[in-house]
Amino acid sequence: MKKALFLDRDGIINIDHGYVAQIENFAFTEGIFKLLHLFIHKGYLLFIITNQSGIGRGYYTIEDFNTLTSWMLNILNTHNITIEKVAYCPHAPEANCHCRKPQTGMIEEILKHYPIDLSNSWLIGDKQSDIDLAHNAQIGHSIAIGSRTFENYDYLFPSILKCAEFLEENHDIITS
């Protein structure tokens, strides 16, 4: 069983400008490469789990999302970062689907293909629905990012960079 890091995309991997679907609107968050390398060096598999309601709302297409995702994964690969899978929910919130966070459908789909020790895994997100997903899926640890009011997280940081700096100094936290 492997341990995993589950990451939200918008607000964690990239700056959330709202419905980011074009390469020219995508900017990696400061510190994300450092953060991902910390987890990679501790033996974690990396997964992105992202609600993409812009598809269901008709703001952009699955093809737009796939083009941006391929570009993002290529950039990450140039930094020696491999994402095992990008799982996404294309539905609008009113669809009441099983894959939209905080529902566990994306995690369940990943578990069909990867033997993951959820109790020793982490989730990083910038919305309460991300943190709630960690609890709903029984992911052992969660990190909340941002200035919102959060509940039920293990750590809270104002930014990805601050999170990376903290974990770099306290790397034993992510060693199991």
Image (cartoon, grey):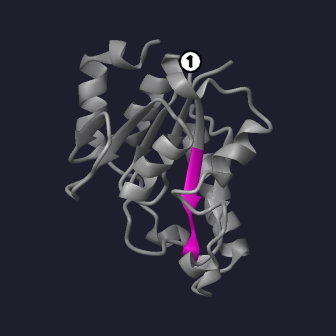
x then y, percent, for residue 122: 47, 32
x then y, percent, for residue 75: 56, 47
Figure quadrant of residue 55: bottom right
Q: Judge from the rendering whether residue 56 lies leftward or rightward of residue 147; answer left or right.
A: right
> Is residue 60 inside the magenta stretch?
no
Residue appearing at x 56%, y 74% in the figure: 53
> Considering the numbered disc 1 on the image, is that residue within a helix, a strand or a loop?
loop
x then y, percent, for residue 157: 23, 42
Residue appearing at x 68%, y 18% in the figure: 1
| In the image, residue 133 above or below residue 62 | above
Query: Is the residue marked by circle 1 packed among few (<14), some (14-19), or many (20+) residues within 10 Å?
Result: some
Q: Is residue 106 visible?
A: yes
Figure quadrant of residue 66: bottom right
Q: Amino acid at mark 1?
A: Gly
| In the image, residue 56 above or below residue 138 | below
Q: Nearer the viewer, residue 120 or 174?
A: 120
Q: Nearer the viewer, residue 138 or 7?
A: 138
Residue appearing at x 35%, y 12% in the figure: 172
| In the image, residue 114 above or below residue 7 | above
- Kindly give the residue lying farthest to the right in the view shown: 113
Q: Is residue 13 visible?
A: no
Residue appearing at x 39%, y 41% in the figure: 32
- Residue range in magenta is 48-53
> Is residue 49 inside the magenta stretch?
yes
Q: Judge from the rendering whether residue 50 lies leftward or rightward of residue 12; answer left or right.
A: right
Q: Nearer the viewer, residue 100 or 171?
A: 100
Q: Judge from the rendering whether residue 116 lies leftward or rightward of residue 101; answer left or right.
A: right
Figure quadrant of residue 171: top left
Q: Nearer the viewer, residue 52 or 133?
A: 133
Q: Which residue is mark 1?
A: 43
- Kindly give the residue lying farthest to the bottom in the view shown: 58
x then y, percent, for residue 119: 53, 25
